[in-house]
Each structure stands twice: as C-alpha cells, then as structure tokens.
C-alpha cells in the first residue's frame, strides 16, 4: 500500500449531513489523490446514524465508532495511533474544504520544516472571516481588549496582541495558536501525543500549540488557504455542563498558564464583558430594530450566564 501524505482526522457528534458534506469536499476538492490521504472518522456515539452513513457512503474511510461521547480531545487521540502519514490534519465535521486546500496545507508544511502547526483562513457560510481562526494566548490585557471592544476604539499601536485575529491579513504570520477546526501538524513533532485529555472540548488547541512551541516549533496562520466552517452546529445539540465548554476550555488554559490565583480576574472580566455586550446590543436593538442586534443581545446574555455559572463553580 502507498504511504499517504496526510492523515485526516474528523471527530463527529450528531451532524450527519454536515459530516457527509465535509467528507465529500475532502475527496472532491482537497487537491490530493485519494491514495495520498488516509481519512479517519471518530464518531462520539451519535444517535443520528452518522456512523452508518460513513460505512455505506464512504467505505474508503476508517471509522471508529465510540459507545460514549468521550470529547473532542480524547477522540482525536484515539485516531492518532492509526495515523500513517507524515502530516496529520484535524478537521471539524462542520467544514467544507475549498478547492486545493488540503494540498495547499501540505505544500506549506513541506516548504517550512521548522513549522509544527499550520492553520488556515476559516470562513463563515457567507464567506466572512471567523476571527477565532487563531490569535494570541489569553492574557489579562487582551481579554479586556476583546471583551470591552477596545480593539475597535484604540489605535493598533496601543493594542496588545489580540486574543482572536483582529483583521483579515493577506500573508502568512506566526501566531500563538490556531483553531482545531482545521489544524495541520507534523506527525514527527507530536511524539505520539495529540491533546491533553484534561480538556473535554475547547482550549485543547491552545494547549497543543503551546506545547509544540515550547518544544521549538512554529505555529503559523496561512490566509492563502480557506475552509468554510459552519461553527457551532454540534454545540447547538448539546445540553447541561457541555454548553459551558466553550468558556471552560480557554479558562482552563489560562489557569494552566497563569495559575489559579489569576482566575478571579479572568472570571470578572469575562462576566462583565458579556454583560456589557448584552447591554449595548439591547440598546442598539431598540435604536435599530431588525438589524440582528436582538440575536446578539440574547447570545451575549446566555454567555454571561454561562460565565457566571463557571465562576460560581470555582
């Protein structure tokens, strides 16, 4: 058998139709021949027949069907031991690969041997930029800058390195972290380990990038390559404490970086920031009805409540 150039890992939970579109785009638009790719789907106990869809419609895909939802990090780790390619591409099931994107990521890794991680330009369904494609590690200054809209008020020279990308750049740039929604890694740098299993969902991509940077590798964001990401579709189906993961994950990484004593400031900034956003969007909705501000206000309110719940949990 031919050794693949890249192993693609897709972790799925109850987004069968999106997973189908993702896999179809990988084979039809990725830019690599089928035998150059090893594709592994790990299904986290979906109840929408996702696993059966993969078996019947994509027989060339290796399927790992879990009996329980073990989380994003653990599921990726399950697949890593089966990876045969020199590169590993982590890809969310709610993505659509644009023409030549996978080949472009491979070529970028080939060109720069000191790069351990490459992320690409993530686009919303309307092709606008998703700022959470990558950025800087969470620090007090960039948290305040992000949550209190200072990135829109202060001159760029005064702003700290942004938590999330604050502009749509054209050239490759070194960053602290890139999103695990589309992340290509050099298998030889992983030393048999992907994610820290203490992270259930979110934040594990920051921790992985930090670990590889500390080992001497570079983390690069490349806007030359694009992937469409229908962000949050799987989370819409979650319930209970899992809904807190999007805030708990980065908070857990902040604690790992700064220690437990700094958490009370982190929590205060997060709760106050979402509270401010809720207030401002509510006022904007009254001034300009029908301009989508009501939805943003509801979202900010919900996130404030989740942040408060996490603060109370300690």
Image: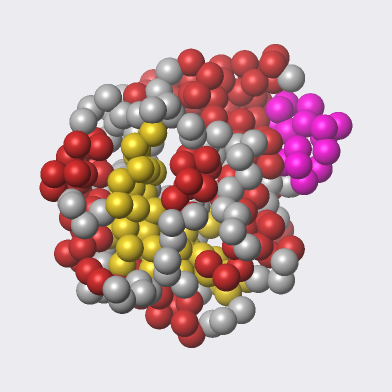
Q: What span is colored magenta in the figure? A: 254-269
- Residue plotted at (64% across, 21% down): 310
Tell me: 264 left or right of 54.
right
Q: Residue at x 42, y 69 (%)?
A: 85
| Residue 176, horizontal then vertical, whole percent | 64, 60
The quarter of the displayed image where residue 305 is located = top right
Our reading of the magenta stretch's main secondary structure is helix
Up the image or down, 142 lies above or below 158; here it is: above
Instruction: Give the residue at x 39% y 63%.
Output: 7
Can residue 91 be seen by looking at this rendering?
Answer: no
Answer left or right for 181 relative to 54: right
Identify the image quadrant of the C terminus.
top right
Q: Nearer the viewer, residue 310 or 292?
A: 310
Check the image and report above or below for 191 versus 70.
below
Image quarter (top left, top right, bottom left or bottom right) of the N terminus:
bottom left
> Would you identify the image quadrant in which residue 291 lies?
top left
């Amino acid at each position: 058998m031919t050794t693949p150039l890249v192993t693609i890992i897709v972790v799925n939970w109850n987004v069968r139709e999106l997973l189908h579109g993702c896999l179809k785009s990988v084979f039809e638009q990725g830019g690599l021949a089928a035998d150059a790719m090893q594709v592994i789907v790990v299904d986290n106990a979906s109840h929408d027949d996702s696993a059966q869809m993969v078996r019947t419609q994509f027989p060339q895909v290796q399927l790992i069907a879990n009996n329980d939802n073990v989380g994003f990090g653990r599921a990726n780790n399950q697949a890593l031991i089966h990876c045969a390619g020199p590169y590993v591409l982590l890809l969310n099931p709610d993505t659509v690969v644009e023409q030549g994107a996978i080949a472009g990521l491979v070529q970028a890794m080939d060109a720069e041997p000191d790069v351990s991680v490459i992320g690409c330009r993530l686009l919303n369904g309307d092709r606008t930029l998703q700022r959470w494609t990558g950025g800087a590690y969470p620090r007090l200054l960039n948290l305040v800058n992000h949550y209190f809209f200072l990135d829109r008020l202060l001159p760029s020279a005064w702003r700290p390195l942004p938590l999330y990308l604050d502009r749509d750049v054209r050239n490759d740039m070194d960053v602290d972290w890139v999103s695990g929604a589309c992340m290509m890694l050099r298998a030889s740098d992983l030393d048999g380990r992907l994610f820290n299993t203490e992270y259930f969902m979110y934040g594990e991509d920051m921790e992985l990038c930090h670990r590889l940077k500390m080992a001497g590798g570079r983390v690069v964001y490349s806007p030359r390559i694009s992937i469409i990401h229908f962000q949050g579709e799987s989370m819409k189906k979650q319930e209970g404490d899992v809904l807190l993961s999007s805030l708990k994950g980065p908070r857990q990484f902040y604690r790992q970086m700064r220690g437990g004593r700094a958490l009370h400031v982190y929590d205060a900034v997060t709760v106050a920031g979402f509270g401010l956003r809720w207030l401002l969007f509510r006022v904007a909705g009254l001034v300009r009805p029908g301009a989508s501000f009501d939805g943003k206000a509801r979202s900010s309110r919900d996130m404030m409540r989740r942040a408060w719940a996490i603060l109370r949990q300690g």
